Amino acid sequence: MKRIAVVLMAFLFVSAALADTADVGKSLSVRTFQFKHKQADKAAAMIKERLSADGSMSIQPTANSLIVTDDPETLKAIAAVLAKYDAPPQPFHLTVRLVSAARGGKTAGARIPDELKDLESKLALLRYDSIESLGAAEFDGKEGEPGLANLATYRAEFNFGEYDPASDTIAITDFKLSRIDDGTLAPMMKTTLNLKLGQTFIMGVTRQPNSQRALMMVLSARR
Amino acid sequence: MISCDSFRMRFHTGTDDAALLEHLRACDRCLDFAAHADPDVMFRALGGSEIVPPGGVDAFVDGVMQQVRVRDAETTVAAGHVVAWPRRFAMAAAVAIAAFGATLVYRNDVPVNLEPIHRAELRTLTTKPIVEAYDSQNATIVEVPTEETDDVKIVMIFDENLPADL
């Protein structure tokens, strides 16, 4: 009887040792990320979807840091993303074009301005066949810096938001478009956009889907 | 054996007359007759007061006591069959090892299949909405479908609060 008990005890010990060895591959690691240029809570929101099922994190607001617990491989991927994210404010270039679009205005000999030829086919999808440039502006700025430009009778204001390396987008926050009427500003709209670098974004605003006129903002961001 | 008339002439309550009792053992009619007058006569006729176990009373008592001792011995032996604690421990350990071993095998199999799935998820979770926010209660935002590879994205915003003369 004693012999059986001893053998079983030995087997238990060996099994426990094997279990420890097997757990090494699945064990969780803890890592603290302290941010110099970005907010920890925004970083947490950014990596939330990247955590594995076993992963977790906690924000330390006073230290502006993030404590992440996850398996080593996921932690490595998260560290790479956060390292890119916590970069000093980066410079970006934003082009804004303001275009007036109308339906039923195209007649024989109607002319599309050369600078809007690239938009003709796209706006035709929306059945706008008459387009007119109201102005264009180019902005150079870093993350967190504001931008402002007057385009014909409109004023565009915005802030360069944060760059998200995961989606390769730059946030254009508080983009406000106002109309200048007799020297006074009449706010029209306010929005926040995520612009993918190198991609042209056309944002059309109008009252109803069957409205004959629309205002098109054509935005493009790059480094 | 005496006749029935002779029996009825000689019979009286409490009799132990051997001839009468012998007649009762053979004659049912006289037994009914006698039982009415003396119910105990039937037992006397059977010889109940003189029953002696085979081999005598001493042998009978010895037999009973032997059975008692055998039962006691059986109870003691049965108590000896209760599983001792080392054996219980060994059995519990064996069950635990079996369960633990099965868990080990299961856990060792999992990473092989899950790893590529995690990587695939990471790639697909990197999209953001183009229009993250728009300040209006009455607006409808519609993204115009374009091809996946198209480098132009179009979004239309229909807002009743916008001026009519855009």
Image (cartoon, coloured by chain):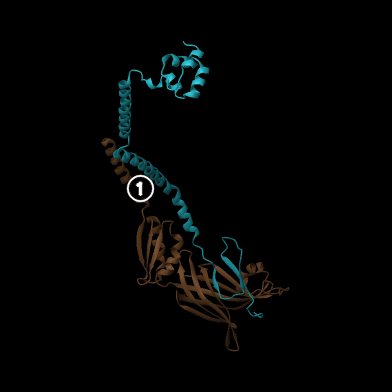
Chain colours: A brown, B cyan
Q: Residues within 10 Å of mark 1 (few under 14, many from 20)?
A: some
Q: Is residue B103 above or below residue B118?
A: above
What type is the residue that disc 1 sits on? Ala
Single out the residue that lies furthest toward the top.
B1
A183 and B92: which one is in front?
B92
Relative placement, left or right, of A78 versus A210 is left
Indicate the position of residue B123 as horizontal and vertical percent values: 48, 58
Question: Residue B83 at what x, y percent from top left?
Answer: 32, 37
Residue B25: x, y in percent? Answer: 47, 16
Q: What kind of element bears circle 1?
A: helix
Q: Which residue is mark 1?
A: A22
- Figure quadrant of residue A60: bottom left
* Residue closest to the far bottom: A182
Q: In the displayed image of the protein, which residue is found farthest to the right?
A: A108
Residue furthest to the front in view is B9
x 36%, y 50%: residue: A25
Q: Quadrant of residue B40?
A: top left
- Percent position (x, y) of residue A112? 65, 73
A81 in relation to B158, above or below = above
Relative horizontal placement of residue A15, taking residue B27 as reference (left or right): left
Q: Residue at x 49, y 73 (%)?
A: A93
How many marks do you count on the picture? 1
| Image quadrant where residue B68 sits | top left
Tell me the quadrant of the picture where the N terminus of chain A can be found.
Answer: top left
Chain letter for mark 1: A
Nearest to the observer: residue B70 or residue B33: B33
Q: Which is more toward the observer, A149 or A206?
A: A206
The correct choice, above or below, for B15 with respect to B88 in the image is above
